[in-house]
């Protein structure tokens, strides 16, 4: 089973390209499910068929479904929220504060991700292609399982201590929820199962957001296997006149953006272009045509590893001295901040923050310096002498 997530800045055409990829896979004889988790559902418009919350076959071997996140919130989260609220109350949190703490922003996205996993396991499909929301929502979705499961792990520890004193009766319910979220995190970070494909248009603002997204996903340990550059203007050739001049100017600007992406050290095998179309691509025939342009004779699932895994690499430089490579793609203008938080290294890059658990070897060490380059961060650490 392969799960392929499509995301990008709003309006770049990710729904169309996700649907086209799914249609291309189905044309090759692979049973494929395309799922929309974008709150602004437009997948039904792309395939030109009405879709609901259960998969329907829209073409031979191609199934489609739109996840109703709000419906899942009403059905599933109410019960889970009560379990967490009781656990917080048992932990000594005031009942009003406990109620406020269980209103978790973005929980609807987490439930949508759980629904994707359920759908992936429930049918005959070989591949699940997911049309995610815009980049900001997707990054929040991909970060939440780790963040909430960490919060729940601490709650379980607190509950276990109270249980030893005769309190904490809802520990098991919270533990099950934490295990569920942890399994979602493992699904996302398994490169053999799940990869992300970013969609962008050749514009500087969009390309800058795409570079930041690459960094954020690398921090999460999530593999990006391709970038699709959509709406590339056709080259006018020997045409004359004002329209041809406009096309040349626009294409030249787009080529400059692509050159800037290449200058960041991005693997060019990642990038696949799709030309702008005069007619809006709607319906299966148009989607199959786009898949042909996008992948040609290649396997649509044969992406390219960005080369940022593993995230952490440790080397010993001398007795008691170590270097930790945090392998994330960085721009020359990236804003980077590091901080030590207990046994974690807090890494913040361009506003995206993650707590990275230090390898056991480095936990007794103190950070003594850091530098960055195109391959990521290089952190210097030194083991502290006893009593220092």
Image (spheres, grey):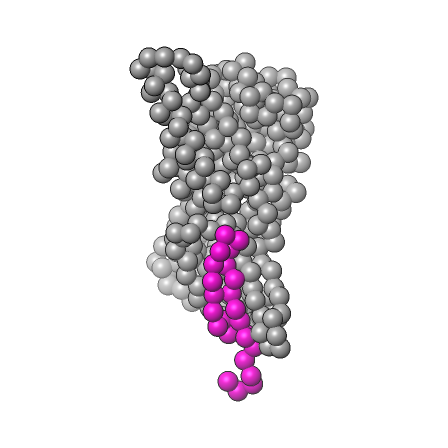
* Residue under the point 53% across and 53% down: 375
User: Height in image: 353 above or below 240?
Assistant: below
> In this figure, what is the number of numbered marks?
0
Q: Quick one: 189 or 241, which is closer to the camera?
A: 241
Q: Is residue 193 left or right of residue 211?
A: right
* Residue under the point 62% across and 46% down: 190
User: Which residues lie in the magenta part?
Assistant: 364-388
What residue occupies the far left of the structure in this picture?
A: 242
Q: Quick one: 64 or 227, which is closer to the camera?
A: 227
Q: Is residue 243 left or right of residue 168?
A: left
Residue 228 on image: x %, y %:
50, 32
Q: Is residue 194 left or right of residue 369?
A: right
User: Which quarter shows the N terminus?
Assistant: top right
Q: Quick one: 60 or 368, which is closer to the camera?
A: 368
Q: Which quadrant of the figure has residue 250?
A: top left
User: Height in image: 40 above or below 262?
Assistant: above
* Residue under the point 39% across and 28% down: 252
Residue 286 on image: x %, y %:
51, 15
Dominant SS of magenta comes to strand
* Residue under the point 56% across and 77% down: 383
Residue 363 on image: x %, y %:
56, 71
What residue occupies the far bottom of the structure in this picture?
A: 387
Residue 378 on image: x %, y %:
52, 62
- Is residue 262 on the magenta stretch? no
Q: Would residue 65 be seen by someone viewing this image from the given angle?
A: no
User: Height in image: 155 above or below 120?
Assistant: below
Q: Would residue 327 be seen by someone viewing this image from the given angle?
A: yes
């Amino acid at each position: 089973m392969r799960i392929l997530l499509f995301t990008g800045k709003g309006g770049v055409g990710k729904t169309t390209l996700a649907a086209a990829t799914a249609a291309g896979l189905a044309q090759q004889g692979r049973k494929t499910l395309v799922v929309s988790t974008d709150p602004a559902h437009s997948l039904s418009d792309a395939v030109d068929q009405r879709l609901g919350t259960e998969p329907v076959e829209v073409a031979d071997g191609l199934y489609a479904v739109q996840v109703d996140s709000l419906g899942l919130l009403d059905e599933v989260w109410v019960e889970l929220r009560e379990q967490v609220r009781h656990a917080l109350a048992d932990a000594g949190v005031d009942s009003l504060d406990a109620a406020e703490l269980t209103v978790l922003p973005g929980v609807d996205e987490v439930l949508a991700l759980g629904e994707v996993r359920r759908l992936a396991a429930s049918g005959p499909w070989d591949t699940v292609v997911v049309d995610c929301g815009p980049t900001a929502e997707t990054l929040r979705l991909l970060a939440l399982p780790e963040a909430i499961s960490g919060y729940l792990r601490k709650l379980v520890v607190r509950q276990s201590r109270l249980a030893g004193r005769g309190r904490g009766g809802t520990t098991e319910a919270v533990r099950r929820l934490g295990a569920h979220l942890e399994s979602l995190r493992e699904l996302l970070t398994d490169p053999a199962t799940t990869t992300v494909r970013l969609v962008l248009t050749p514009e500087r603002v969009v390309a800058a957001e795409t570079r930041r997204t690459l960094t954020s996903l690398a921090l999460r340990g999530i593999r990006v296997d391709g970038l699709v550059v959509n709406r590339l203007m056709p080259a006018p050739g020997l045409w004359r006149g004002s329209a041809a001049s406009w096309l040349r100017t626009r294409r030249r600007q787009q080529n400059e953006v692509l050159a800037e992406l290449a200058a960041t050290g991005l693997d060019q095998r990642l990038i696949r272009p799709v030309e702008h179309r005069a007619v809006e691509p709607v319906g299966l025939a148009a989607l199959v045509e786009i898949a042909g342009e996008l992948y040609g004779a290649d396997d649509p699932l044969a992406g390219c590893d960005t080369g940022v895994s593993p995230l952490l690499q440790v080397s010993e430089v001398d007795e008691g001295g170590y270097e930790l490579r945090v392998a994330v793609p960085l721009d020359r203008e990236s804003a980077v901040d590091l901080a030590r938080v207990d046994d974690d290294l807090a890494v913040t890059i361009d506003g995206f923050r993650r707590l990275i658990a230090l390898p056991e070897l480095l936990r007794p060490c103190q950070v003594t310096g850091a530098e960055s380059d195109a391959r990521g961060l290089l952190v210097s650490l030194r083991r502290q002498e006893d009593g220092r």
